[in-house]
């Protein structure tokens, strides 16, 4: 087990180095000279050679690529992602709180998604082919075909404007969570509950279930074994959902004016604020790698066969 | 005296209405061993599972199954559950998949023994360990703490037999218990089956398509094909004086296939 | 393979196929079919309901909503099909090379795929748009760059599986040229897998592209695109919520049609699935969500 964890960590670490290098190179691949971007972002109309060179020196843009990468990498480890081209503030001072806000939304949504997927998946598997199963799957099919932002807008109009039950936007109280979490849950649970359902169904047909029944075990005991094996899927869904939602709350955050990474990144992209974009991509990539590694490890812990295999 | 009488057992698929087992009737004398022989898909396994109503809900069955004077088809779900394992035990074909892969194998034994005999963990383990020693399993204490994938098919098969020894059922249904094993393990498992019959004196239904094994263990033989019983008789009768063309065909193919195995069996 | 005859008996599948083809044709012939110019502003017709000359009414600038929907097919649907085609092209080529020749080439291509896939798709797209700037072309580039790796991996697996088959090995051993084997033997069998993954990823791609337009990162006003129309409608959401309906429903219909079609194709290509699952239920093992 411990060897597996070490292996997985080394792999994750290597991946992080590669990702950081790519992230850094990406920005330098941009067709625009960053110095020009800085000047434009600060609203300086005339970009003379002199001014560009000054800016390059000020932001350290004139040094060789790898020197800058190493500097940047070391700084990133201390959460120093440089200064925003637009506001001149340290990137982390805006990115940090935004990350926390997005993470809160993601965590609540992931829990909701896991609960909904497991409950629906188990119910549908137990009622397979019956009315409940067909109805749930039909509704899920339609819901996953809906653009989430469209559904969000309709819900804001109905629940917040027409009925005035919930806030339209922002992040003021627990009530602000209800609609965004609902929308995110709808768009992902519709997919994940199928995984739980099919995993339940395949487990129900396994030999160990037959042997359990043939040995006279109570249906509830047999069901616990089925759940135990099927819920591995649920756990890995939960771990996988966190990084995916973290990266795709952009649209939902935008609709609900959630003060998180999504809103921040859109603003940064529209104003071409490279250090912010860079930090955003890096942070999400890191969380993606970390959560994937965690979900692999949890899976291994729950599945004794994987433990020896990898 | 017959311990089991099956009358006009039919099994069919509820969706398509396709008949899978058609009007099977057979009897099992107390203490004897009946072999059901046939190719895969002939309905042998379905018949076995139908005895304790273990087939999936999509399959329907009709007919009478009288076990120790009680028609099992009239029992409630809770009543038949008490018979499963305790009075009618099952030995599965593939030991590797017969145990929950995420639990150590001991869990299954404890749950089963706790269910039927109300034993606590310590008592259940003690009995299992003794039974495992009797089926020649080395280091039984450690084995109980292993996951199914860490053990071999033959070992798991013998552990299922050990469980049957502890439970002392009146009837053991063994569904192709030797098919998934290599020749050596097959030999060992068959020895354990013979021992099992001697020690607890239970009746047995032994499903197989391997006639070499059947000849060793069975008193009577049923030959099934496409859901119907095509021939029946004592083992001696079937092996020397088969009437049905299909039975003779099985005999002919068996002679070429299981030479090696027969050598092993007869050499002992 | 008798995909067609299998598909023909699937009513929902056929309906979806007809819808998809009809919409594609309408999109291609937009200038002929659309009743009005999608960009003509007529402030006197603002928020008009449905009339004989404007079936779906007019938007906040008095433009014909139906015409905008019809022109919107081009960036919303046809463009997605193009992106899919190109990324499948790249993915297939690399997947074939990796799966067929194996060894070092395979290892390298797969490492690159691993890295590409280790980024969440949304983040990757945002990063690329962030570097290259806002605009539909950049979204297209970002999509192609993020999707090919996925296809390459699936194709590789499927090619590997088939090249292990005896008749392909035999062909290799008897000295038939690689190209010939790929073209005559491997392509036809991997085609099935390809169809299924391609058709089932269209739905989510339509949703994503419209999502980026909705955020204002894709196509720029005044051009008509369904996500863009929703973006414009959002500004008047509190007073005129009905503006959200037409483009939203258009997206739902198209995504559902493609999803139904994907399931129907999967069943048509592998009829065994049909017994265990009715049309919209088959397990979407290839579903590409992000």
Image (spheres, coloured by chain):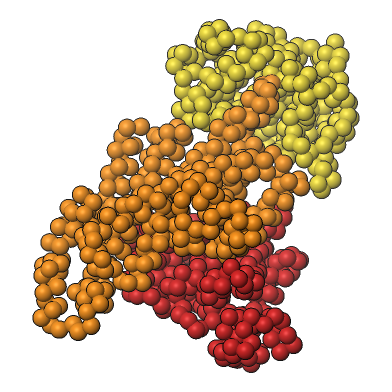
Chain colours: A orange, B yellow, C red
Q: Is residue A8 left or right of residue C198?
A: left
Q: Nearer the viewer, residue A205 or A95?
A: A95
Dividing the picture into quadrants, the one containing residue B9 is: top right
Residue C142 in the image, given as x and y percentages of width and height:
40, 70
Dividing the picture into quadrants, the one containing residue A226 is: top right
Q: Nearer the viewer, residue C157 or B119?
A: B119
Judge whether C131 appears above or below A44 on screen.
above
The answer, for residue A150, to whether it is visible in the render is yes
Identify the residue at image location x=57%, y=91%: C40
Residue C238 in the image, given as x and y percentages of width and height:
58, 68
Residue C194 in the image, given as x and y percentages of width and height:
53, 65
Identify the residue at image location x=54%, y=55%: A167
Task: Check the picture and name the quadrant holding the C terminus of chain A.
Answer: top left
Identify the residue at image location x=59%, y=58%: A160
Q: Nearer the viewer, residue B26 or C223?
A: C223
The answer, for residue C262, to whether it is visible in the render is no
Dividing the picture into quadrants, the one containing residue A27 is: bottom left
Number of numbered discs: 0
Q: Is residue B177 left or right of residue C90?
A: right
Residue A17 in the image, given as x and y percentages of width and height:
25, 53
Identify the residue at image location x=26%, y=66%: A87
Task: Check the picture and name the quadrant holding the N terminus of chain A.
Answer: top left
């Amino acid at each position: 087990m411990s060897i597996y964890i070490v292996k997985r960590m080394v792999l994750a670490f290597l991946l992080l180095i590669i990702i950081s290098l790519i992230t850094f190179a990406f920005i330098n691949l941009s067709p625009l000279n960053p110095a020009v971007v800085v000047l434009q972002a600060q609203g300086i109309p005339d970009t003379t050679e002199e001014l560009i060179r000054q800016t390059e020196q000020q932001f350290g843009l004139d040094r060789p690529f790898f020197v800058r990468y190493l500097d940047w990498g070391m700084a990133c480890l201390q959460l120093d992602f440089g200064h925003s081209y637009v506001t001149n503030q340290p990137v982390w001072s805006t990115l940090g709180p935004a990350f926390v806000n997005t993470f809160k939304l993601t965590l609540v949504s992931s829990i909701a998604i896991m609960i909904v997927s497991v409950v629906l998946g188990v119910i549908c598997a137990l009622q397979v082919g019956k009315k409940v199963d067909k109805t749930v799957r039909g509704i899920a099919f339609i819901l996953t075909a809906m653009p989430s932002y469209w559904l969000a807008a309709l819900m804001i109009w109905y629940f917040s404007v027409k009925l005035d039950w919930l806030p339209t936007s922002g992040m003021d109280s627990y009530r602000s969570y209800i609609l965004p979490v609902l929308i995110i849950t709808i768009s992902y649970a519709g997919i994940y509950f199928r995984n739980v359902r099919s995993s339940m169904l395949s487990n129900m047909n396994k030999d160990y279930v037959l042997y359990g029944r043939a040995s006279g075990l109570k249906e509830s005991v047999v069901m616990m074994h089925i759940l135990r094996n099927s819920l591995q899927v649920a756990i890995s869904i939960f771990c996988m959902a966190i990084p995916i939602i973290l990266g795709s709350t952009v649209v939902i955050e935008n609709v609900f004016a959630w003060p998180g990474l999504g809103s921040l990144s859109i603003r940064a992209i529209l104003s071409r604020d490279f250090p912010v974009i860079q930090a955003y991509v890096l942070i999400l990539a890191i969380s993606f790698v970390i959560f994937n590694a965690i979900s692999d490890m949890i899976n291994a812990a729950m599945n004794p066969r994987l433990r020896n295999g990898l | 005296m017959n311990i089991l009488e099956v009358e006009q057992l039919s099994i069919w698929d509820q969706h398509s209405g396709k008949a899978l087992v058609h009007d099977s009737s057979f009897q099992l004398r107390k203490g004897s061993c009946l072999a059901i022989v046939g190719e895969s898909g002939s309905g042998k396994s379905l018949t076995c599972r139908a005895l304790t109503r273990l087939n999936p809900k999509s399959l329907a069955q009709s007919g009478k199954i009288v076990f120790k004077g009680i028609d099992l088809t009239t029992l409630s779900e809770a009543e038949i559950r008490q018979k499963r394992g305790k009075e009618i035990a099952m030995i599965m074909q593939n030991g590797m998949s017969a145990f929950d892969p995420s639990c150590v194998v001991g869990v299954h034994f404890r749950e089963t023994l706790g269910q039927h005999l109300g034993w606590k963990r310590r008592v259940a383990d003690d009995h299992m360990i003794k039974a495992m020693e009797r089926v020649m399993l080395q280091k039984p204490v450690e084995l109980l703490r292993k996951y199914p994938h860490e053990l071999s098919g033959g070992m798991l098969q013998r552990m299922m037999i050990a469980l049957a020894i502890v439970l002392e059922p009146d009837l053991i249904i063994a569904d192709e218990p030797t098919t998934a094993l290599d020749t050596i393990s097959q030999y060992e498992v068959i020895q354990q089956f013979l021992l099992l019959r001697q020690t607890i004196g239970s009746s047995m239904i032994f499903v197989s398509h391997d006639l070499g094994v059947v000849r060793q263990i069975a008193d009577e033989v049923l030959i099934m094909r496409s859901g119907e019983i095509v021939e029946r008789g004592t083992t001696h009768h079937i092996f020397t004086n088969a009437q049905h063309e299909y039975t003779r065909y099985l005999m002919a193919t068996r002679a070429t296939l299981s030479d090696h195995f027969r050598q092993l069996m007869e050499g002992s | 393979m008798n995909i067609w005859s299998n598909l023909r008996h699937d009513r929902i599948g056929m309906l979806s196929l007809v819808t998809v083809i009809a919409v594609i044709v309408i999109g291609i012939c937009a200038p002929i079919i659309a009743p009005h110019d999608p960009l003509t502003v007529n402030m006197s017709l603002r928020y008009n309901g449905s009339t004989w000359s404007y079936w779906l009414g007019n938007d906040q600038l008095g433009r014909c909503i139906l015409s905008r929907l019809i022109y919107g097919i081009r960036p919303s649907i046809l463009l997605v099909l193009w992106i899919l085609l190109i990324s499948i092209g790249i993915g297939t080529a690399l997947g074939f090379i990796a799966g067929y020749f194996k060894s070092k080439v395979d290892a390298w291509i797969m490492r690159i795929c691993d890295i590409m896939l280790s980024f969440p798709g949304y983040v990757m797209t945002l990063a690329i748009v962030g570097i290259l700037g806002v605009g539909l072309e950049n979204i297209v580039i970002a999509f192609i760059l993020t999707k090919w790796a996925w296809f390459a991996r699936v194709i590789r697996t499927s090619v590997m599986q088939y090249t292990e088959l005896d008749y392909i090995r035999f062909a290799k051993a008897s000295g038939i040229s690689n190209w010939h084997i790929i073209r005559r033997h491997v392509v036809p069998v991997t085609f099935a897998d390809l169809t299924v993954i391609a058709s089932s990823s269209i739905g989510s791609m339509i949703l994503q592209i419209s999502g980026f337009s909705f955020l204002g990162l894709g196509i720029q006003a005044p051009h008509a695109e369904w996500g863009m129309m929703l973006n414009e409608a959002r500004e008047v959401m509190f007073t005129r919520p009905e503006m959200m309906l037409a483009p939203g429903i258009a997206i739902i219909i198209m995504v559902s049609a493609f999803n139904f079609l994907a399931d129907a194709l999967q069943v048509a290509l592998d009829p065994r699935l049909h017994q265990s699952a009715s049309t919209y239920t088959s397990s979407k093992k290839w579903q590409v969500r992000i």
